[in-house]
């Protein structure tokens, strides 16, 4: 079947068969479909829609377009967490060693930051020497030795997704739920998991800004995971403001290491709380704990004993990084950065934060990417001081921009300042965990 | 403005501004838009639609993406004819010399065949030596010397269209009226014309199969031409069966030369009648004749005197071809071809012809292209014997396939035979000229 026939069918609003979708994905993988044909079909899918069967066919075709990992040599249960992406969202770095130290293998395949959101791989690379490009063999070996590994998507894992995602990013076809589901789940299902917990973000810094969309996405992800035989649950969490204390790659790793050292600063508490919630659910789904309560208790033990930190230290060594960052996380920080305070221009209560604008501000000082090929400055970032619900007075610090120069600071200062809405009325701090799906 | 922003606007059904459309076309020309971004936007335009203002903006941007020819050095009026494409549609080769011999300059920029339709350039290339790749200077000089020239679209004429058309062909986005209008008119308006007659095909072999669509296309083309200051008229003509006696490149040139020699066989009469209709309208629009009647009379004089044939002979010499084809058109034909008759399997009246299937059949024996880069066999074709309305008996010849081998013939025989519908009831021969628009 010629690409044009499949494209025309979706162009005209027809439902594509499993075999048409497989033909498409095969064509993506063997390059018999040109990029412009792929993007034309994706746009037609975006506008005309994909039903549940098409979504499942697409996920299946993308999943089996590549290698599906098999960890049957590891007798522990396998679980992973995946976040739909946010600003200051760094829980993977805490969850992976924490859950691994509780006896669950975590084969975590992560991505890079793009647009306003950060990516786990970029964060990890701010640890000197840390290698995120593991071969499948290294990935297996490291999980075997320390319980978890964190790597980029190899060419063998869901190769169709890698190509399609890059095209979607360039053609304004990212924010469509069935495409998001197929993209996420084709990678996560390739990890050979028993259990998967999804952190679906909602609010100004999430891809899904409306709560209804976040909920739909969570439901579709959970349904797809379970359909493919992986115990799946989703936590809808608030991304109405950046998560925790810092945004910016090295700063976020610093925040995580401090948490793993059980030196949790007040503004980093949401990072810990969300990590605890997600980790506990992973332990229950994986069958290691029989209740959330016992899971939380086990996790707290592993945090306080230093086992989780020790697990991360081992991982850093195995992935080629410098483990001394575990002893003194501050070595990650660049002392030469300019500290540029963002101060409130009126008094009242912090009513809202445009996390998207903050994410874009970080990109503009070099901390993120506009295009996949951009290089980043891992050192820069933002220290978040005020949180929604806080009372603030004109002149109070809302945050501190940590950047390279005055001109950088002046360039983004207004965007960041405008991201904070101060209102006259007292308002509540938003609930971090909004809802559990599945 | 980033490509993604413009793509997202049309994706969401917004109306694009003139400046957004110009940004897009500039991006096509300077390659700052990738092919996959162009095709994503084109698909969004196809599905979401373009209104009249957007259609005009697109035409304008594509027109001025390249050179607009200026024939002010020629003091005759300039006119051209453009067909929306059909099967056996070869009138350009008759009209150009005919109209030129009546005192109108014809700067004809033509295309190649693709899919089921033929293309003037391929037909001309079956004349030994004929060069269809003229520089702008050659194009001017030849028109000055013999009154017309026929050339492919140079890289300087509407370059955006060339790129976009190739992508549309590969991404199932050809059949959408505003895109067709912008594609046709950006090239035709670049010819520096005073008058333009459009031959909008309707029926089984046309891109627009429904009459309503053909009519809408005709109206939009005429409105666009007039808006840009070119006197424009459209003739909606029947493509419910192949036009005239032959389909196939060399055979079609043969048919045209026989007509220009005033040796018009009965089955070639529709070719002549449509050529006469279109030519007469060109003369009136160009101001050379004051009525269709006097235009027809002038044309008949030029045919009978041999002036039109002489004009074509001069053109062939000027474009590097062998002018002896004018003396003996049969030299164009390859005597070694296999003649494979297509015979009726039942008796009755020829009620309908699937010209699209016939066009595809010709492609399958090598006479056309599936992809722009395919090479063609100019010699092969089909001689059309039965016409809609004819009484036929089982065993009567409907046509003769002229191809290279038995296996070729057996391969397409059934497709061609199935293209003919024989019914029990007497039916009328369809009107060739259905309606005049403008």
Image (cartoon, coloured by chain):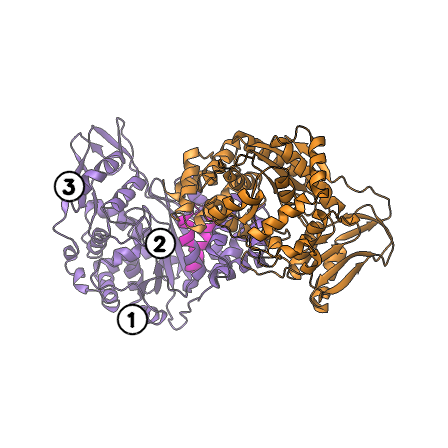
Chain colours: A purple, B orange
For the point 62% across and 38% down, the residue is B198
- Distance from disc 1 to disc 3, alpha carbons, whole Å, reads 46 Å
Could you tell me how far apart the alpha carbons at marks 2 and 3 are, in whole angstroms? 48 Å
Q: Nearer the viewer, mark 1 or mark 2?
A: 1
Q: Residues within 10 Å of mark 2 (few under 14, many from 20)?
A: some
Tell me the magenta residue range: A165-189
Q: Nearer the viewer, residue A410 or A325?
A: A410
Q: Which residue is drawn at 69% across and 38% down?
A: B299
Do labels 1 and 2 touch, CB within 8 Å? no
Q: Residue B417 carries which label?
A: none
* Residue A383 falls in image quadrant: top left
- Residue position for label 2: A292
Discs 1 and 3 share one subunit:
yes
Picture layout, residue A400 above or below residue A185: above
Q: Nearer the viewer, residue A431 or A167?
A: A167
Q: In this view, does B412 lie to the left or right of B36?
A: right
> Is residue A179 within the magenta segment?
yes
In the structure shown, which secondary structural element does the residue marked by tag 3 occupy?
helix
Classify mark 2: helix, strand or loop: helix
Q: Distance between the residues labelled 1 and 2?
A: 27 Å
Toward the viewer: A76 or A410?
Answer: A410
- The residue wearing badge 1 is A145
Give the residue at the far top of this rendering. Answer: A424
Name the residue tied to disc 3.
Answer: A406
Viewport quadrant of the C terminus of chain B: top right
Identify the chain of the residue marked 3, using the numbered disc in the image.
A
């Amino acid at each position: 079947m010629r690409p044009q026939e499949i494209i025309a069918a979706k162009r005209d609003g027809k439902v594509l068969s499993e075999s048409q979708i497989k033909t498409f994905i095969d064509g993506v993988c063997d390059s018999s479909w040109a990029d412009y044909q792929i993007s034309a079909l994706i746009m037609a899918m975006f506008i005309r829609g994909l039903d549940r069967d098409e979504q499942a066919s697409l996920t299946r075709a993308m999943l089996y377009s590549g290698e599906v990992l098999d960890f049957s040599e590891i007798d522990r249960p396998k679980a992973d967490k995946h976040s739909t992406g946010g600003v200051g969202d760094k829980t993977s770095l805490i969850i992976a060693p924490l859950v691994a130290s509780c006896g669950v293998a975590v084969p975590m395949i992560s991505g890079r930051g793009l647009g306003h959101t950060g990516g786990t791989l970029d964060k990890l690379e701010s640890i000197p020497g840390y290698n995120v490009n593991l071969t499948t063999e290294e990935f297996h070996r490291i999980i075997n030795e320390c319980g978890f590994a964190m790597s980029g998507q190899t060419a063998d894992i869901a190769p169709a997704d890698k190509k399609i995602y890059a095209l979607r990013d360039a053609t304004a076809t990212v924010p469509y739920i069935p495409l998001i589901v197929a993209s996420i789940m084709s990678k996560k299902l390739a990890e050979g998991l028993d259990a998967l917990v999804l952190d679906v973000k909602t609010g100004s810094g999430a891809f899904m800004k409306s709560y209804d969309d976040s909920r739909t996405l969570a439901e579709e992800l959970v349904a797809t995971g379970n359909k493919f035989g992986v115990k799946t649950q989703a936590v809808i969490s608030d991304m109405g403001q950046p998560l925790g204390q810092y945004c910016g790659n090295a700063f976020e790793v610093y925040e995580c290491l401090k948490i793993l050292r059980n030196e949790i600063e007040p503004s980093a508490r949401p990072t810990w709380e969300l990590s605890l919630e997600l980790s506990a659910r992973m332990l229950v789904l994986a069958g290691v704990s029989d209740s959330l309560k016992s899971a939380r208790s086990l996790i707290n033990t592993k945090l306080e004993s230093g086992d989780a930190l020790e697990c991360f230290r081992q991982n850093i060594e195995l992935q080629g990084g410098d483990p001394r960052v575990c002893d003194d996380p501050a070595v990650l920080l660049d002392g030469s950065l300019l500290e540029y305070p963002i101060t409130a221009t009126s008094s009242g209560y912090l009513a809202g934060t445009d996390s998207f604008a903050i994410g874009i501000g970080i990109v503009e000082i070099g901390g993120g990417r506009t295009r996949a090929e951009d290089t980043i400055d891992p050192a820069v970032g933002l220290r978040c001081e005020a949180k929604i619900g806080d009372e603030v007075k004109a002149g109070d610090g809302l945050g501190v921009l940590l950047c390279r120069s005055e001109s950088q600071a002046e360039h983004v200062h207004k965007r960041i300042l405008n991201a904070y809405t101060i209102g006259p009325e007292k308002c509540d701090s938003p609930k971090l965990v909004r809802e559990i799906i599945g």
